[in-house]
Image: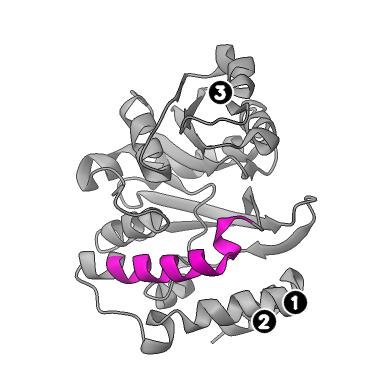
Amino acid sequence: MRIAVIVATYNARRNLARCLDSVLAQTAPAVDVLVSDGGSTDGTQAVIERYADRLAWWRSGPDGGIYDAWNRALAARGGVDWVCFLGADDALCDPTVVERLLPVLRTAAPAHRLVYGDVEVTDQDGRVLAVLSEPWARARRRIRHTLTIPHPGLMHHRSLFDLRGPFDPAFAMAGDYEMVLREIPHTAPLHVSGLRVARWQEGGVTTRLSAVRRATRERNAALAKNGLPPAPWFLRSGAQDLIRLSLRQLVGERAMRAVQRLYRRF
């Protein structure tokens, strides 16, 4: 069984090495690493070149955003069974992650084409602020609100793309959400409880007000594209996201995550 980890980058020189080290350190055999860079100008390409002899594929050049970058790497993946997507700010939690996932992945498809574990949310210094862990039976209740499956470390079976097509590059922020919406009418995602798969670093573009508004618009567009009813007005308007952003700025990330955990219980 072959696993592909696809990393999209753009001007990510500071964090890319940490991401690649976490993937290349995996103890599981047959893990292919592919890097799709959007034509960085900050020295990212030099970082990639240092790892070039350990990568299955890489490119650096203009693209249409993260989902176009992922699609380009998908087209080059060839012969892999499962695909995981990371941003340059993400990392796998430890060297045994893929090895521990393998027993589940060997039998998951075709009943489950999406397999996910838990994800650590960290600050810029690597401190763990929260752990995203939610079984699909609960996560599905809010799937019209947001992507309740943490995408870093989410494993995609190769048949998903054969059947549903590539990511839609018309989306800048919600293409992963739209892909999940395409699949869930056909198979349910499988949660591997207790296995921390990836680390997701807070403080990126999604913490900016303009990005929050765009993400809301794109989530609404993803629902409409898949013939799903819109989220309730409070969520469709983006009010919840704006409140979350305000809480983060007011009380800090850790307290905001505690409020979110309480919300998820209902």
**Mark 2 or mark 3, which is nearer to you?**
2
**Mark 3 or mark 1, which is nearer to you?**
1
Question: Distance between the Cα atoms at labels 1 and 2?
Answer: 7 Å
The amino acid pointed to by label 2 is Val
Magenta stretch mostly in which secondary structure? helix
Q: Mark 3 points at which residue?
A: 29
Which residue is outermost to the top? Answer: 53
Q: Name the residue under label 1.
A: 255
Q: Name the residue under label 2.
A: 259
**Which quadrant of the view contains residue 204?**
bottom right
On screen, 56 above or below 162?
above
The amino acid pointed to by label 3 is Pro
Part of the protein shown in magenta: 204-221
Any part of residue 95 in sight: no
On screen, 75 above or below 70?
above
- Magenta stretch containing residue 218, yes or no? yes
CB-based contact (under 8 Å), mark 1 and mark 2: yes
Badge 3 or badge 1: first in the primary sequence: 3
Which residue corresponds to the image point at 59% horizontal and 16% vertical from the top-left?
49
Which residue corresponds to the image point at 40% horizontal and 36% vertical from the top-left?
69
Residue 100 in the image: x percent, y percent? 60, 40
Badge 2 or badge 3: first in the primary sequence: 3
